[in-house]
Structures are given as C-alpha cells and as structure tokens.
Image: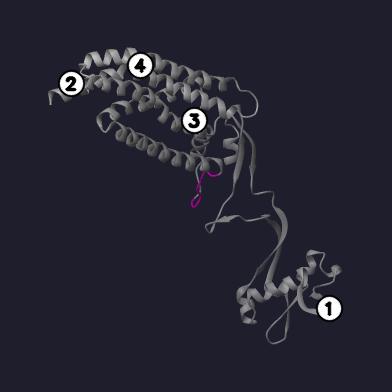
Amino acid sequence: MVTAAIERIPGVTDIDISRKEKKPELKVTIDRQKASRLGLDVRTIGKTLETFFAGTTATRYREAGNEYDVEVRLRPEDRTKPEDLRDIFVTTPTGEQIGLANIATIKEGVGLTKIERKDQQRYVTVSADISGRDLGSVVADAKRAIEKIPAPPGFSCKFAGAEKERKEAFSMLIVATALGMVLVYMVMASQFESYRDPFIIFLSVPFGIVGVILALAITGLAMNIVTFISLILLIGLVVNNGIVLISYSGILRHRGYDTYQAIVDGGRSRLRPILSTTLTTLLGVASLLFVQGAGSEIWVPFAVTSIGGLTLSTLITLIMMPVLYSMFEGVKMQN
C-alpha cells in the first residue's frame, strides 16, 4: 500500500521494496508436548535436522600436516524430496528412534528471503529516487499520502536515508548560522567598543535572510545545504556596508558634526564605495547563474542566495540604517 501511495507522487521514480518475493519452504511444526514426553526438545530436533540435511563437522582428520573436516550428513539421494524429511528419525535420550512425522507436522509453504531488524524490531524498507523535484517537497507529499493509509496495530512509518541526513544537516547548519551571527556581533562590538552601533548594523542581517527567501521563491528553488552555506557566508558580507557607513558617520560625529549632517555627509561620501563593493560582488557571483552541466545544481542556488540576500541588505543599509542611526543618536542626546 505504501508503494502504491508514493508511486503517484510527481518526481518519484525507481521505487523498490526490501522484502522480495517469498520462496517455497518446508515448515516443520513440532508438537512440544509429544516431544517432551519422549525427552526431546526443539533444540535437539533442530540439530538433528541440521546434521542430516546441512551437515555437521564431526571431527577433523590430519594427514601429512594437512587438516580435513569430516562432515556427517545424509547421502544426496536421501535428501532431495520433501518425503525424505518425513522419513528421518530422531534419537531420544533412551536410545529409541522416533520418526519425525510422529512428533511434528510438515507442510509446504512460502517464507521470507530475509528478515531485517533494527533496535530489536522488524522493518521493511521502501526506497525511491527523485527526479525533477527537491527532496523536501517530495517528502512532504509522501507524508501526506502515507498518513491517509490506516496503519495496523503495532506498525509505524519513519523516513530515513537522504531525508534523515537532510534534517541532521539542517539542524547543524541552523546552529552554525546562529553561532556565526553571535560571533559577528561580538567582533563588531569589540571594534566599535559599543553595543549600540553594532546592533544598528546587525539589523541588516535579518533583511538579508528575507532577501534570500524572496530570491528562492522567485526562482522556484528550494532551501538546501548549499543555500544554507551561502547564507552563513552572507552574515559576514551584509554587515560590511553597514560598517563602512556607520563607522564613518561616527567619525564625523566625533569631529563635531551634528547627527543630521554626519548622516548626510557620511552617506554621500560612502555611497560610491558601498555600491562599488556590492556591484563587484554581485557581478562576480552572477557568473555562476550561467553554469551548465555537472555542478550547476550546486552553484546556481549558491548564486541566487548570494544575490538575493546581498541586494536587499544593501538597500536596507542605504535607506533604513541612517534612519535608525539618527533615532538612536537622538535618544542618546536626550539622555
């Protein structure tokens, strides 16, 4: 049922199930009460069957420095038909031989080729490949399709493989992103010797993340490990323009300029360096958009993420950051 549910999902190909076709087998069901009255147990009977049909190494023969296993088993002509299993005898502790058919029921049936276990629980793996769609959206569709299937008691479904690795990688990258933001703020706080100016500059980072989301939404790309890595790099890039602008405005304030004049002169003198730095970075990254063939699935999302985040953060730096700086300076002067 799971296989039938996910094969209708667009982008899912090459579905495979770990439980293969069952193979014919002979099932020996031992009557434990009869066997017990005769002094036999399941282990002894099983060992006898193994010796007769699979063989058991009884001893080893040595000759001229060579060692040979001496294997005990029935002759090939005595172990070829199902009837041969019914005709074997099991020796009791008293030395009496009892026919297997007297203490067990032998039936022909089918059985599994292998039984998979994990954490002491049996499981079946349904695997598939993805083509033309991202992993996250396909998994979301698969979850919705599987939730509609009534699960029997004791059964559960869990996603593993590439989806499990993706979740683990995203968790680590989220931690790395948060750590990167903290480190960037700490470095700026130590350089400015203030908590206020780095906070103003740091406000461009959330807008850079918004730019990344907008760029991915416009291009139809999904968030993946590559875009996350690009986002971590953007944390350091997007604050550069703010550092250039706010630091120079602060220098002008120390020279005696009022807040308004410091912002105007600082913005006028730092507009060209900010635009030059941003445009050269954007043009350099834009070349990755035209990569084709092997590796394009890595470089194109990287370029889209970088362009979207850097563009919006630069606009916020030039428009909103001077406003925030004037507000904070006004509060400082009132105090």
**The label number, if any, that marks residue 270 in the structure image:** 4
Q: Earlier in the sequence, mark 4 or mark 2?
A: 4
- The quadrant the N terminus occupies is top right
Which residue is under mark 2? Answer: 330
Say whether residue 175 is magenta.
no
Name which residue type carries label 3: Thr
Q: Earlier in the sequence, mark 3 or mark 1?
A: 1
Mark nearest the camera among 4 and 3 is 4
Percent position (x, y) of residue 80?
82, 64
Which residue is under mark 3? Answer: 227
Mark nearest the camera among 2 and 1 is 2
Give the residues drawn in magenta, as a range.
153-160
Specify the quadrant of the image occupied by residue 308. top left
Mark nearest the camera among 3 and 2 is 2
Mark nearest the camera among 4 and 2 is 4
Q: Is residue 256 above or below residue 230?
A: above
- Nearer the observer, 105 or 214: 214
Magenta stretch prevailing secondary structure: loop
Name which residue type carries label 2: Gly
Q: Are marks 3 and 1 in contact (CB under 8 Å)?
A: no
Percent position (x, y) of residue 219?
51, 20
- Nearer the observer, 135 or 180: 180
Mark nearest the camera among 1 and 4 is 4
Label 4, residues with CA under 10 Å away: few <14, some 14-19, many ≥20: some
Q: Residue furthest bottom?
A: 94
Which residue is under mark 1? Answer: 65
What's the distance in space between the residues labelled 1 and 4, CA to CA? 91 Å
Q: Secondary structure at mark 1?
A: loop
